[in-house]
Image (spheres, rainbow, N blue to C red):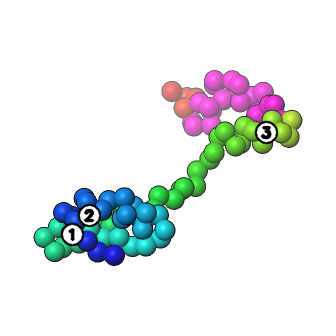
Amino acid sequence: MEMALREAKARLSELVSAACNGERVIITRHGHPTVELVRCERRGGIDFDRLDATRRHLGLTADGEQWPQEFDDPAYSRQVLGLDGE
């Protein structure tokens, strides 16, 4: 569906519904395509609320990270980065 900006303003809800249903909606200005309305889709990432709920459901309370004791030493990172001799 392609529509001029002036008409699109008057029919915005209709255009939004069409875009939500997967239809391609292009709004033109002076006869040239300017904007395309598209449905917003969830883009990956981490759903932290769902993660917390799952962890509680599984009985997981700790973060699971068991770092070796030497990682707690601030000098350790200097050794790894080769900054010990400075």
Judge whether 12 appears above or below 84 on screen: below
Pinpoint residue 56: horizontal percent, then vertical percent: 81, 35
Q: Camera-side residue: 11 or 30?
A: 11
Q: Residue at x 71, y 42 (%)?
A: 51
Pinpoint residue 22: horizontal percent, then vertical percent: 47, 70
Amino acid under disc 3: Arg
Q: Residue 8 got which mark?
A: 2
Secondary structure beneath dot 1 equals: strand
How far apart are labels 1 and 3 at the CA level? 51 Å
Lower sequence index among marks 3 and 2:
2
Q: Is residue 49 magenta?
A: no
Q: Camera-side residue: 12 or 54?
A: 12
Q: Residue at x 63, y 45 (%)?
A: 47
Q: Residue at x 47, y 58 (%)?
A: 40
Specify whether 46 is left or right of 37.
right
Q: Residues within 10 Å of mark 2 (few under 14, many from 20)?
A: some
Pinpoint residue 74: horizontal percent, then vertical percent: 63, 24
Q: Residue 4 got which mark?
A: 1
How far apart are labels 1 and 2 at the CA level? 6 Å
- The answer to whether residue 45 is seen in the rendering is yes
Q: Residue 55 got which mark?
A: 3
Q: Residue at x 36, y 65 (%)?
A: 15
| Quarter occupied by residue 34 | bottom left
Judge whether 75 appears above or below 81 on screen: above
Amino acid under disc 2: Ala
Q: Residue 57 got which mark?
A: none
Point out the stretch of residues depicted in magenta. 60-82
| Quarter occupied by residue 48 | top right
